[in-house]
């Protein structure tokens, strides 16, 4: 049932998406009842939307901060953090598209947040201008303290380049096992990493209650909060 663990000198790369945080009460994007049901992502998650109506974008992300502030890591986050603590961050590589910070809150020491973070905001005028951290339960600032321009979350919107792509690409081509957890595989370049890993010889696994039909060597149709603790228990 479970994939074989990577040998001690090889790595496993987990690429997670919104489904990993679903059991923490954070809505996914594209499922029924998801964040984007009934609204168009381009109205809030593009630089153009921000330029056109910064207040609308601020409201959307201020609500996201409020929701994420109430969320706690679930058994899936805790299992990944446990595995990374046991085998170390070189052998257990965690890449997430999620911006909620829950893997870090679960105790994972090294996480690549390729779509940025809800907990860091910057002046819309550009990087290097005003920048502030936002804590759990805090209301994000609307305007830059230096120039008064609208602030935006340091998340990666459509048309922007995700973070640390070279590093993730190198990790994907070298890993022994690649596990896509709770992601629809619709958004690139994240969606391309499993194929990259597979071409380079990795054993690829999808963990999702509803298979996406992508080309994986093994599909585990189960929720992350149930399957990850069991997988980690089996591997350790
Ligand atoms: C469970 C579960 C449980 C439920 N357990 N699972 C045509 C071809 C290729 C690319 C493009 C194209 N046209 C346009 C593009 C580019 C575009 C893109 O991919 N568009 C597609 C929509 C077609 N991509 C970009 O613009 C990216 N940038 C880019 O390409 O730059 C150019 C460039 C790249 C490289 C080098 C040089 C230049 C940027 C993409 C940024 C995405 N940003 C967002 C918003 C972040 C901020 C925010 O949070 O608001 O990121 S969009 C949104 O989607 C968010 C997510 O991270 C991302 C992925 O969503 P995810 O996580 O997969 O969630 P869902 O809801 O889709 O799926 C949830 C899954 O969980 C489901 O499968 C459920 O079944 C499952 N699930 N419960 C496990 N309990």
Image (cartoon, rainbow, N blue to C red):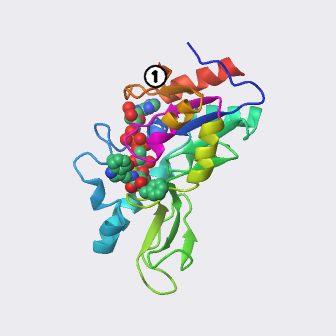
- Residue 136 lies, with reference to residue 207, above or below; the image says below
- Quarter of the picture containing the C terminus is top right
Residue hosting label 1: 222
In this view of the protein, which residue sits in the foreground, 139 or 161? 161
Q: Position of residue 203 (x, y in %)?
A: 58, 24
Dividing the picture into quarters, in which one does residue 171 lie? top right
Question: Magenta stretch?
Answer: 175-193
Q: Residue at x 63, y 47 (%)?
A: 111
Residue farthest toward the front in the current orientation of the protein: 199
| Residue 65 can be seen, yes or no | no
Determine if the magenta segment contains residue 211. no
- Quarter of the picture containing the N terminus is top right
Q: Position of residue 3 (x, y in %)?
A: 60, 18
Q: Residue at x 28, y 37 (%)?
A: 32
Dividing the picture into quarters, in which one does residue 151 lie? bottom left
Dividing the picture into quarters, in which one does residue 149 lie? bottom left
Mark 1 residue's CB less than 8 Å from ligand 1: yes
């Amino acid at each position: 049932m479970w994939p074989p663990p990577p040998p001690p000198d090889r790595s496993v790369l987990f690429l997670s998406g919104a489904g990993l945080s679903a059991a923490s009460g954070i809505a996914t994007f594209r499922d029924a009842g998801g964040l984007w049901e009934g609204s168009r992502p381009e109205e809030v998650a593009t630089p153009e939307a921000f330029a056109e109506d910064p207040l609308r974008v601020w409201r959307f992300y201020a609500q996201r901060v409020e929701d994420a502030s109430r969320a706690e890591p679930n058994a899936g986050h805790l299992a990944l953090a446990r595995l990374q603590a046991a085998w170390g961050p070189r052998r257990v590589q965690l890449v997430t598209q999620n911006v909620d910070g829950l893997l870090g809150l679960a105790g994972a020491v090294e996480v690549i947040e390729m779509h940025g973070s809800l907990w860091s905001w910057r002046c819309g005028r550009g990087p290097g201008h005003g920048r502030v951290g936002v804590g759990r339960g805090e209301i994000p600032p609307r305007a830059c303290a230096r120039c008064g321009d609208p602030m935006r979350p340091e998340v990666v919107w459509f048309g922007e380049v995700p973070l640390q792509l070279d590093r993730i690409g190198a990790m994907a081509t070298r890993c022994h096992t690649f596990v896509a957890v709770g992601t629809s595989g619709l958004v690139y370049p994240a969606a391309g990493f499993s194929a990259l890993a597979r071409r380079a010889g990795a054993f690829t696994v999808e963990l999702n209650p509803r298979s996406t039909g992508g080309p994986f060597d093994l599909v585990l149709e189960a929720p992350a909060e149930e399957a990850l603790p069991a997988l980690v228990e089996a591997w350790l």
